[in-house]
Amino acid sequence: MAEAHTPHIAIIPSPGMGHLIPFVELAKRLVEHHLFTVTLILSGESSPSKAQRSVLNSLPSSIATVFLPPADLSDVPSTARIETRIMLTMTRSNPALRELFDSLSARKRLPAVLIVDLFGADAFDVAVEFHMSPYVFYATTANFLSFCLHLPKLDETVSCEFRYLTEPVKFPGCVPITGKDLVDPAQDRNDDAYKWLLHSAKRLREAKGVLVNSFFDLEPNAIKALQEPGPDKPPVYPIGPLVNTSSSDVNLKDESECLNWLDNQPFGSVLYISFGSGGTLTLEQFNELALGLADSEKRFIWVIRSPSGIASSSYLNPHSQTDPFTFLPLGFLDRTKEKGLVVRSWAPQIQILAHPSTCGFVTHCGWNSILESIVNGVPLIAWPLFAEQKMNALLLAEGVGAALRVLAGEDGIVRREEVVRVVKELMEGEEGKAIGNKMKELKEGLVRVLGDDGFSTKSFSELLLKWKAHQLEINQETFH
Ligand code: UDP
């Protein structure tokens, strides 16, 4: 229940686990460490998935949760890209959001601050109507935030598709990036998803501030450049890493099976392979990965989903509708039964990465997965699939030196020989050793930034002061 004197913050993540998880961590930090009041507002096309429900069930009771009615997307073609669907879901939830704030206002419990993610910029309109301070939480990198802030200019100055640019694009302090490694919606400027991306990027300047889930030691130059004052530039607050370190109760039986299996493996011997909350591979790619893992003869835990031609096809519902085991190559389970564990759709990632038997992570480069790996000092093999994952892979592999990146052939497929190469290099090679050392360094860095006097702690404190001051202003207007 909101008390008049404690700051009340409303936060709205867009649908999908990759946004829900860091927003929940932000909410927990605000209520548990700073005694703020938080209302977590959820929108979607349908009711929450099993994985989302599990995260929501583990919330402390001090966080109020409100589900907005499902957004109507019945007129949107089924071929629309996932980013378009998410953006429309958020924008079409505005009327319901307005009703919610009307009712909170009538009870004198209106939040002082509204925090959205990169898909939620249209909710700024509602925030302003209710005199709430609008903020954005980028649950991704400072490099990506920099790209978004520069996108309007890039859009004006480049006339071709970005993927045809012959030179890498350079943003201040960021790793130079080729057009084809840019975020998915920027690959086709005629698609609605690009128009939404550009629209959101243009609205960023209306935010009172942008929180970013990164930290100084990971992206020092990008963060420095973002914090230099400039026109049309909101203040940027690197507050990361905000990472869930506790278990959720998804699939408890499978969860304990995984951890029991890991308990019985030698120290530092197991590679964990997962493509996030919803990444999927094509059937051919799924086969090549399976055969590569078997050929490598290393120990592994592999989280599998039924193959699909669209890499993000399970993003809004991580659990496969068909049994993914039926797609494994013939004889695979027999060949690997001494060394491998295959898990359906979802595994207790946090505990796997923290387990002493784990020594590496093949990841699709979702930002939460990367941060969770850094927190546990686990070296990475970067296998990006969709969204901004290629940008993250580039940052980690070339910018930071904390990942090996898989090389796909001309046909876009990562062959089994390449799987064997990267797995062996990470687990036995010199490059693998250097990556392991870099991870240790980053882990030490994050202890520093999260310390009492650390960079991220100070950024967060600055925000808290701003939010407290705004709450005070609102209270004075409301109660006097
Ligand atoms: N996750 C998990 N078990 C799984 C797959 C994912 O617990 O089997 C969690 C993972 O720990 C992370 C989140 O789901 O916190 C995935 O977020 P990320 O940004 O890595 O990727 P996304 O799912 O958004 O593509």
Image: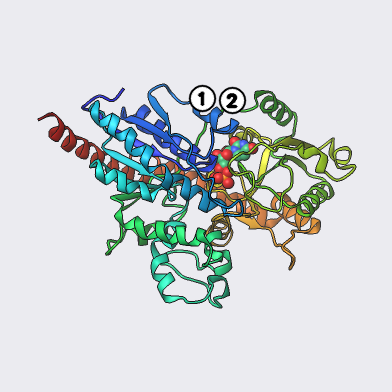
- Packing grade of label 2 (10 A; few <14, some 14-19, many >=20) is some
Question: With 395 as the anchor, is 290 left or right in this view?
Answer: right
> Where in the figure is residue 116, as x and y percent of width and height?
39, 44
Q: Residue 196 lies in what quarter of the image?
A: bottom left
Give the labeled residue for mark 2. Answer: 249
Camera-nearest residue between 439 and 479:
479
| Mark in front: 1 vs 2 | 1
> Label 2 is placed on what type of residue?
Asp
Asked if residue 133 is positioned above or below residue 109 in the image, the reply reads below
- Going from N to C along the chain, the mark reached first, 1 or 2, is 1
Q: How is the image coloured?
A: rainbow
Badges 1 and 2: C-beta atoms under 8 Å apart?
yes
Q: Position of residue 285 (x, y in %)?
A: 76, 54
Residue on which disc 1 sits: 57
Residue at 38% in and 23% down: 62
Residue located 50% across and 37% down the image: 21
Displayed quadrant of residue 277: top right
- Quadrant of the image for the N terminus? top left
User: Residue 323 placed where, x, y %?
Assistant: 77, 36
SS class, disc 1: helix
Q: Identify the residue at horizontal 71%, vertical 53% (top origin).
A: 309
Q: Can residue 376 be seen from the camera position used here? A: no
Cβ at disc 2 under 8 Å from ligand 1: no
Dividing the image into four quarters, tell me where ligand 1 lies: top right
